[in-house]
Image: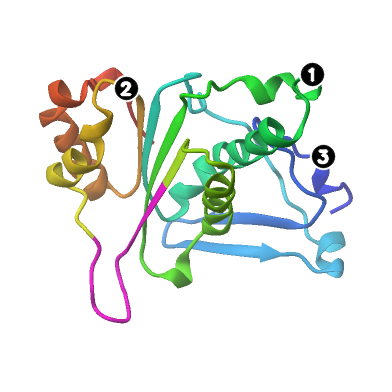
Amino acid sequence: MQHSITSVKRSWTKIANHGALVLKDIDENDLVRRNSIFTHEESFFDVFNIKGPMGKGLCIEESGVHVAFCAGTGVLVFLDLVSHLLLRAYYKHYVEPSKVPKHMTQLKDDFTFLFYVSMLSMDSEIGLNICEALEKVNRKLGETNFKLKVRISKRWDGFRGEVWDEKFVDDNLSPHAGNIRKVWISGPPGMNESLDKAFDKLASKLGVHPHMIDAM
């Protein structure tokens, strides 16, 4: 590539000065996912066309509980938000208020992100390192704006994670009833359908209505 990757912009965070991209190649017969780290030679001979941002975005509200259920590469959609919360914690606790960038004060202190992630195995994990980093930082600083729950489909001991059904949604989200502002669902059709039915049955109890749910 003739141009530095640092020229690529994202809505929440800056991209670090290195050559890492997540590529999703799609053709009519196959779906291949790979995490590519480019060598010095590749960076000059491979050409990549990058488009975006595309779509309507997450439409995040500045306060309240935001919930995401995702599987596989669906995690990528939310990594900018996780990065933002990580940077926000730094600015909040280590930088003088007068020197904090305006975009780091967009979210209120009562903003909470509940992140439910489903993966086939740990070999296929994407982005968990930054999610776990945020958890670690939050524990140290006493922040409670992020909760991560990971479900692994194939484990060495044969144990399968909890099914994301009506009971799971009820058990996990009932404590937040009335405070939920947004729900994102990003996964395969079967998962999306199961969660859609669960929220339909629990709409009144949780205070979550169709216009608050975004299936991605």
Check disc 1 and report the residue beneath it.
98
Give the CA separation, mark 1 to mark 3.
Answer: 28 Å
Residue 10 at least partly seen:
no
Check disc 2 and report the residue beneath it.
179
Residue 115 versus residue 22 in the image, above or below: above
Residue at 87% across, 60% down = 44
Residue 159 located within the stretch drawn in magenta: yes
Nearest to viewer (mark 1 / mark 3): 1
Residue 80 versus residue 161 in the image, above or below: above
Residue 106 drawn at (x, y percent)? 61, 20
First in sequence: mark 1 vs mark 3: 3
Q: Tell me the magenta residue range.
A: 148-161
Foreground residue, 49 or 157?
A: 157
Residue 35 located within the stretch drawn in magenta: no
Label 1: state its secondary structure.
helix
- The mark total stands at 3
Check disc 3 and report the residue beneath it.
7
The quarter of the displayed image where residue 36 is located? bottom right
Label 3: state its secondary structure.
helix
Residue 74 at least partly seen:
yes
The secondary structure that dominates the magenta segment is loop
